[in-house]
């Protein structure tokens, strides 16, 4: 249920090797680092119950769909098991909703049966936009609506997750990410239907320790 991420600007090979070791110890669902380290992560968790994930675009999703699709396919070739993308926020804020859908669909058609999670970046959206964005992700065919990249300081809230859950109505899974640091938050979001969490390595360990202490 936990995707342990370490994608800071100064992440190193040593950081990735530590992440791999923690994955073997704690059985994260996936590990996600900078795209250049996908081969290292994939090799490091091969044969375990953890997979390597990968992004395929920048934080605003501004690349054309065909470039995202190419990047996604390349990450799969290098060993990634799942792909995260960002909805084209420029299209979305321009009201170009059909273009948003086509962008998502291009990536999903490229990755096929592999899981695609589409980030809508909830800190930049109001309540109505969150619901609209979630519906567009479903229309585009992504497997998950993901709340945020985690690069913006504002955390994802239970209220925002509830809006997404009401919009998707079980037609896609929900991944919550961005400032999720406590077991209480995780449990509240599970109650709303969240099936995956993207958390930093440090937060993942604290959440698991809190769960084990019960």
Image (spheres, helix red, strand yellow):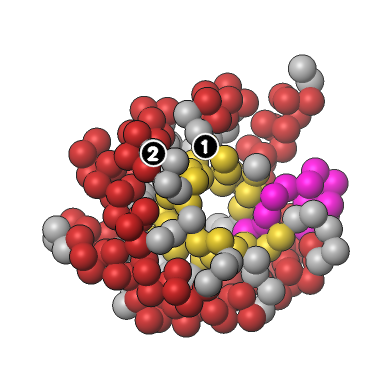
- The residue identified by callout 2 is 169
Residue 24 in the magenta stretch? The answer is yes
In this rendering, position of residue 165 left or right of residue 173: left
At which x and y percent is residue 6? 62, 55
* Nearer the camera: disc 2 or disc 1: 2
Residue range corresponding to the magenta coloring:
20-32
Could you tell me if residue 59 is visible in this image? no
Q: Quadrant of the N terminus?
A: top right
Residue at left 85%, top 64%? 47
Above or below, 208 against 104 in this view is above
* Residue 65 position in % (x across, y down): 35, 76
Question: Which residue corresponds to mark 1?
Answer: 194
Mark 2 Cα-neighbour bin, 10 Å: few <14, some 14–19, many ≥20: few
Residue 95 is a magenta residue: no
Q: Residue furthest left?
A: 95
Q: Is residue 192 above or below residue 60?
A: above
Q: Quadrant of residue 58?
A: bottom left
Q: Mark 2 falls on what kind of element?
A: loop
Residue visible at 37% across and 69% down in the picture: 105
């Amino acid at each position: 249920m936990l995707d342990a991420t370490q994608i800071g600007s100064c992440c190193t090979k040593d950081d990735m090797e530590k992440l791999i070791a923690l994955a073997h110890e704690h059985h994260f669902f996936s590990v996600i680092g900078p795209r250049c380290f996908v081969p290292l992560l994939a090799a490091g968790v091969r044969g375990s119950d953890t997979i390597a994930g990968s992004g395929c675009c920048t934080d605003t999703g501004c690349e054309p769909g065909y470039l995202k699709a190419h990047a996604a396919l390349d990450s799969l070739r290098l060993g990634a098991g799942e792909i995260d993308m960002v909805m084209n926020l420029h299209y979305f804020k321009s009201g170009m909703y059909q273009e948003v859908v086509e962008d998502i669909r291009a990536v999903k058609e490229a990755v096929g049966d592999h899981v695609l999670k589409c980030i809508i970046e909830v800190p930049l959206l109001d309540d109505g936009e969150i619901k609209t964005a979630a519906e567009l992700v479903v229309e585009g065919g992504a497997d998950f609506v993901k709340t945020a990249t985690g690069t913006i300081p504002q955390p994802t809230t239970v209220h925002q997750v509830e809006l997404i859950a009401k919009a998707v109505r079980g037609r896609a899974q929900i991944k919550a990410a961005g400032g999720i640091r406590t077991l209480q938050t995780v449990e509240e979001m599970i109650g709303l239907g969240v099936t995956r969490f993207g958390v930093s390595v440090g937060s993942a360990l604290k959440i698991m320790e809190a769960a084990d202490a019960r």
